């Protein structure tokens, strides 16, 4: 009998670690860990266990307490786990201490997101943006790469080769950062010129949390072949398509998705990409209404929009994935009393309660409920988009034959 051997690389395994603090409830911690597991899966790792601990604040040395660290170490050694991923950003000293204690690869949420962005980036601009963010993340953490030489004595005349190597690496990284910034400045000037040439057209930008279906909505409206996948950050590069509805033309842009605890280096490096949002006339805020944390995701997106100065733009709230909701979810019934009971049975109903109470978005925004997958309520979506685009179009072209369009 001939034995066959697989040449496919073995999937790495990971355990995930998060803290419950006064600013984060146990329910939120579990939800963030589920999201972190999805991030790990998108990056190619298999999650095998969660570890949580309740602390007032992260331990300054090892993020978790001594007892919890021993528990994690015992499991990692017994099961042969490849890496430990922490839900919050670790300091350079915490990474060094954890690597020394656990003797496996240590990642935090920021590094995991950066890794996914590097896998997803396709255009020269996106690749340069991600590479810049990676170098900015790496620079303060270089010391751990030379920990095998840390026993070299310091002082005058006792400077070890590790320190020389470290300084050389720091200089190389700083030079790389400077070169990437120059490259991005040139690309940004070209992008700004392209955007300026679009000033005579209405611009609509799709925004939302990652994996809520923005690219699928883009496909529905533009009828173009836009990449969409059930993974986090399936789209990193901005995609622009011309769309015409009832003789009203506009440019529709699919932008990078947002996420909680998004690394600040990525927000900074993707500034030119986010300018597509900032310079848009109208925003389409896509929400996965079937997600139990839909309201928190809306708040995260609104917070990021405020951070980049795009919070006050006319916005259409697009509640996607209604096909995944319980039957009759969008009907006027149930009553508030029935809704309270429904929430206890299925937490997704809490989205409907909050939606009724505060509009689940900015006050005054229009809203529409759709299923991009099942193509439900597509015509209503197109009509809402048309009305918003037409109002802006007539502002640009006041002499346009409005009556003929309507």
Image (spheres, helix red, strand yellow):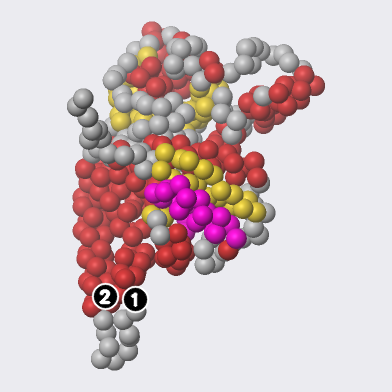
Helix, strand or loop at label 1? It is loop
Q: Which residues are magenta?
A: 67-92
Lower sequence index among marks 2 and 1: 1
Residue 190: x %, y % from top left: 21, 43
CA neighbours of label 2 inside 10 A, class few (<14), some (14 to 19), many (20+): some
Q: CA distance from mark 2 to mark 1?
A: 7 Å
Q: What's the mark number on residue 196? A: none
Disc 2, disc 1: CB below 8 Å? yes
Residue 258: x %, y % from top left: 45, 40
Answer above or below: position of 108 versus 353.
below
Is 233 magenta? The answer is: no
Q: Residue at x 73, y 27 (%)?
A: 344
Q: Is residue 255 visible?
A: no
Q: Which residue does the numbered mark 1 point to in the structure image?
A: 150
Q: Which residue does the numbered mark 2 point to in the structure image?
A: 162
Q: Check the picture and name the quadrant holding the N terminus.
A: top left
Q: Is residue 103 visible?
A: yes
CA neighbours of label 1 inside 10 A, class few (<14), some (14 to 19), many (20+): few
Answer above or below: position of 319 versus 72.
above
Please state which of residues 201 and 163 is positioned toward the viewer in this rendering: 163
Q: Residue at x 50, y 56 (%)?
A: 73
Please state which of residues 105 and 134 is positioned toward the viewer in this rendering: 105
């Amino acid at each position: 009998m001939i034995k066959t051997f697989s040449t496919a690389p073995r999937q790495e395994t990971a355990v995930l670690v998060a803290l419950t603090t006064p600013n984060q409830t146990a329910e939120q911690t579990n939800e963030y860990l589920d999201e972190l597991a999805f991030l790990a899966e998108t990056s190619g790792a298999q999650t095998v266990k969660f570890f949580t601990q309740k602390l007032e604040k992260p331990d300054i040395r090892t993020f978790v307490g001594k007892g919890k660290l021993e528990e994690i170490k015992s499991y990692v050694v017994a099961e042969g786990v490849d890496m430990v991923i922490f839900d919050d950003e670790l300091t350079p000293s915490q990474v060094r201490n954890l690597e020394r204690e656990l003797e496996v690869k240590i990642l935090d949420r920021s590094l995991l997101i950066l890794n996914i962005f590097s896998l997803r980036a396709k255009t020269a601009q996106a690749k340069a943006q991600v590479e810049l963010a990676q170098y900015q993340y790496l620079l303060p953490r270089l010391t751990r790469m030379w920990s095998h030489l840390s026993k070299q004595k310091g002082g005058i005349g006792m400077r070890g080769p590790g320190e020389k190597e470290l300084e050389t690496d720091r200089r190389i990284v700083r030079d790389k950062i400077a070169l990437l910034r120059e490259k991005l400045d040139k690309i940004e000037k070209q992008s700004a010129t392209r955007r300026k040439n679009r000033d005579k057209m209405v611009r609509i930008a799709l925004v939302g949390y990652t994996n809520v279906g923005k690219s699928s909505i883009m496909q529905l409206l533009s009828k173009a072949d836009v990449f969409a996948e059930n993974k986090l950050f399936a789209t990193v590069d901005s995609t622009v398509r011309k769309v015409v509805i009832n003789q009203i033309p506009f440019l529709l842009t699919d932008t990078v998705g947002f996420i909680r605890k998004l690394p600040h280096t990525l927000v900074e490096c993707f500034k030119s990409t986010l300018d597509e949002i900032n310079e848009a006339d109208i925003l389409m805020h896509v929400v996965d209404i079937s997600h139990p944390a839909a309201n928190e995701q809306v708040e995260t997106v609104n917070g990021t929009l405020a951070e980049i100065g795009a919070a006050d733009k006319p916005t259409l709230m697009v509640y996607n994935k209604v096909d995944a909701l319980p039957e009759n979810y969008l009907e006027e019934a149930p009553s508030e009393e029935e809704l309270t009971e429904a929430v206890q049975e299925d937490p997704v109903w809490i989205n409907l309660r909050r939606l009724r109470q505060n509009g689940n978005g900015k006050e005054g925004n229009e809203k529409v409920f759709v299923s991009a997958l099942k193509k439900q309520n597509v015509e209503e979506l197109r009509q809402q988009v048309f009305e918003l685009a037409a109002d802006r179009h007539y502002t640009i072209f006041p002499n346009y034959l409005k009556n003929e369009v309507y």
